[in-house]
Image (cartoon, rainbow, N blue to C red):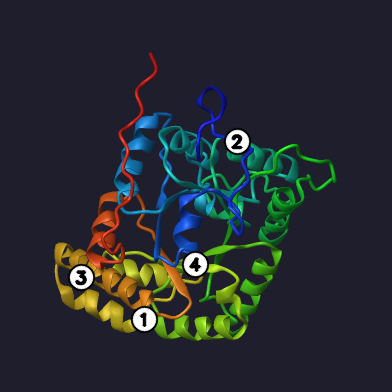
Amino acid sequence: MRAGRAGLPDTSRPPPAGYSSHGRLERVLRSGRFAVTSELNPPDSADPAEVYDRALVLSEVCDAINAVDASAANVHMSSMGICALLSHAGYASVLQVACRDKNRIAIQGDILGASAMGVMNVLCLTGDGVQCGDQPGAKPVFDLDSISLLQTVRTMRDESRFLTGRKLSVPPRMFIGAAANPFVPPLAYRADHLGKKVAAGAEFIQTQYVYDLDIFERFMARVRDLGLDRKCFILAGVGPLASARTARWMRANVPGVHVPDALIDRLEKAGPPKAAKAEGKAICVELIQRLREMKGVKGVHVMAYRQEEFVSEIITASGVLQGRRGRARALPAAPA
């Protein structure tokens, strides 16, 4: 986005026809290229260098970086704070908004603030319950859910107004996303639920981890039958499994994650931890390559908690960048 007054982002300039934003992620997807996103897991720190060090690695292989918003209801640096830092450094970011922690007043204000900083992507989430996290005594909000949040952002962007009807002088120019979990029972309903999010305003989708390609292909077949693959861009979630023990734990404890026995057996037979980690990387690379060939899948969202270098290795090894590179940037200078 070009600069406006005093070097600030020019948020008043409308995007090109058929686009919602000026952002790189949307340009890549609408051009038909296979998109790659990943997550910057927030630090337990107020040091911006801890954000920039991780973003520098991801920017070389990603079209946009998700700023995680207190996932699993655990406290870390906020998504809004991370996006402010990433925007200052010129990175393409995705603001995550969880309805768990804020009411509609705060959320609408954050959307305007993020857009003013040059954030061009937003991921609308309901959010995990506070009982899942490290401060179960916190009071949950849930004034909105993911679908009403999608409708809220779309109303602000497309109708230039708040939910009250009060007009905006300049709307947020944002590419709107949502999450999907194809592996939560009843499986036959998952694509229909996705359809509700698309109808509410979702333009791109990032899914939960995909390890079972057979189940995911059935989900995508239903998505194609409903025509949803022509209405939104689906990025399949992937991530490396460190060991058979990790895979079993995820299958038992993370809602909507299904790891087939065949993958667990591969990890088991790999041997000691170093070999198992290498096998987990190989599995992830294979999944990315196969997902790239699946009709309706337009990209991947690579997740590995605080393992940015490993994510970079996996994406590079998969070959999905097709010779293009992310735009790595130097770290911003420290204030005088």
Mark identifier at residue 291: none
Q: What residue type is labelled 2?
A: Ala
Q: Name the residue under label 4.
A: 207
Please tell me how crowded label 2 is: few (under 14), some (14-19), or many (20+) other residues with Cα within 10 Å.
many
- Mark toward the start of the polypeptide (3 vs 1): 1
What element does badge 1 sit on?
loop
How far apart marks 4 and 1 lie (CA) works out to: 17 Å
Indicate the amino acid at tag 1: Pro
Residue located beneath label 3 in the image = 279
- Kind of residue at disc 3: Glu
User: How many residues crowd around disc 3 within 10 Å: few (fewer than 14), some, or many (20 or more)?
Assistant: many
Residue lying at the far right of the rendered structure: 165
Q: Mark 1 points at which residue?
A: 260
Look at the numbered disc 4 and give the secondary structure of its residue.
strand
Nearer to the camera, 46 or 8: 8
Mark 2–mark 1 distance (CA, rounded to whole Å): 44 Å
The image shows residue 182, relative to residue 127, as above or below, that is: below
Q: Which of marks 2 and 1 is nearer the N terminus?
A: 2
Residue 237 % position (x, y): 43, 66
